[in-house]
Amino acid sequence: MNLAKRLQLIKPSPTLMVTVQVAALRRQGIEVIDFGAGEPDFDTPEHIKEAAIAALRQGKTKYTPVGGTAEVKEAIIAKLQRDNGLTYSLQEVTTNCGGKHTLFNAFHALFGEGDEVLIPAPYWVSYSDMVILTGGQPQLLPTSEETGFKITAAQLQKAIGPQSKALLLNSPSNPTGAAYTENELRQIAEVIERSNLLVISDDVYEKFLYDSSRCAHILTLKPQLRDRVLLVNSVSKTYAMTGWRLGYAAGPREVIVAIETLQSQSTSNPNSIAQAAAVAALTGTQEPVGVMAKEFAKRRNYVVQRLRAIPGISCTLPEGAFYVFPRVAAYFGTKWGEKTISSAMDLSLYLLQEAQVALVAGEGFGSPNHVRISYATSMQILEQGLDQVEAALKRLGRV
Ligand code: PMP
Ligand code: GLU
């Protein structure tokens, strides 16, 4: 089959591939511990499910306006005011089929041939491929443990060139959990203010921040950037609603209209029941979010402490999200039977087969010396999985 050329430029999402692999192994009766999944292990809170059931019973089963009902848009506006101190109108918000779809639509609305998009690396697996699909060019800004996996204002300043169109901000970050402090973000905002850059602020992990109470937002710190920032968020992580597929954007009206035009020629509105559920999620009690965040904080501390006790592994303490991103390169060069483990991908395969633990290799995040472990799973499973990882790494010995 002669597929479209652009399909040769991208690969399947490595994070979703791990989920597929785990499901296939489990179907074969193999017990696998899943540290791959980038989704809360908690169930969607009851009051949200009830709202969805009520919506079904009320016959809210029809098409809605392309960008979502006025109710869901109002709920988003209320959330942005309450949580972020940001004021938006109905014309400045839209909903899509998950945050990933929001980003996809936004990238297609904004980027094209010749545009460079600045992406701090390590980055979430889909950013670069999505940019490539638009014809644009990802421009990676490398970070490391030494910089807390964060870019600096000076680094950004240096990276901005004549083709630079936008900066992607994701704080807290997937996969590193790094989160910018107000001060760091303010300095970055100042560089942006002096440039023509647009900003896409992917806030999907904003509620999972463990050492400070509130996630700094670039727009709260620098309201003057309002015309150049597109805020992207989703109910997936905050409310344990990954399967419902409801993401949203807030930003300049022109961009929102473009996103809705694209959506009107592709998916139409996001699922009507998910929209009703999102209203309950965004406007109802926020208590379940706090419960999840508290539990994630406990798990983060446990996982980091366990990993740091394994010879050859180093691990920063992530400020947020539900991932740790340990450096595993000390194991490169070790022998697995006849084979030599020479990459994070090899090590992940080894751990899947020999420890029955699934995690995501760093290559897909632009960071080949690391692996990503999701701690969005119970303490008991974390304990068991880390025991298995530790034993399997011990068997490998070290070079
Ligand atoms: N942004 C980041 C950084 C993510 O990790 C994800 C994946 N969970 C998304 C956006 C999209 O999530 P969803 O499509 O489920 O809203
Ligand atoms: N974003 C989550 C992850 O990084 C879910 C999978 C995906 O959409 O990539 O694992």
Image (cartoon, helix red, strand yellow):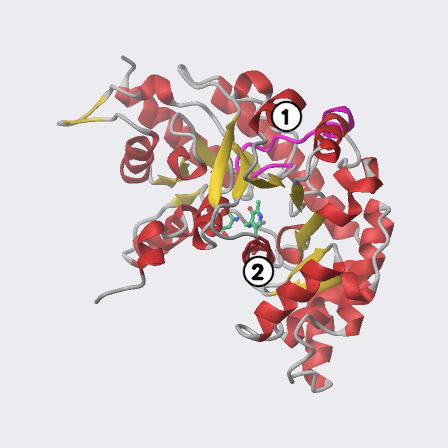
In the picture, the quarter occupied by the N terminus is bottom left
* Few, some or many residues within 10 Å of mark 1 (<14, 14–19, 20+): some
Q: Are the residues at dot 1 and dot 2 in contact (C-beta closer than 8 Å)?
A: no
Nearest to viewer (mark 1 / mark 2): 1
* Few, some or many residues within 10 Å of mark 2 (<14, 14–19, 20+): many
Q: Is residue 354 above or below residue 391?
A: below
In the picture, the quarter occupied by the C terminus is top left
Q: Is residue 323 visible?
A: yes
Gap between marks 1 and 2, in whole Å? 27 Å
Q: Is residue 392 above or below residue 117?
A: above
Q: Nearer the viewer, residue 159 or 364?
A: 159
Direction from residue 64 to residue 164 in the image, left or right: left
Numbered range of the magenta stretch: 172-185
Q: Nearer the viewer, residue 100 or 117?
A: 117
Q: Residue at x 56, y 32 (%)?
A: 161
- Quadrant for residue 206, please give it: top right
Q: Nearer the viewer, residue 377 or 156?
A: 156
- Counting residues from the start of the chain, the first of labels 1 and 2 encountered is 2
Direction from residue 356 to residue 105 in the image, left or right: right
Secondary structure under badge 1? helix
* Magenta highlight: main SS: loop
Amino acid at circle 1? Gln
Amino acid at circle 2? Asn
- Quadrant for residue 283, please give it: bottom right
Q: Which residue is mark 1?
A: 157
Q: Is residue 121 above or below residue 284?
A: above
Q: Which residue is mark 2?
A: 105
Q: Residue at x 48, y 23 (%)?
A: 307
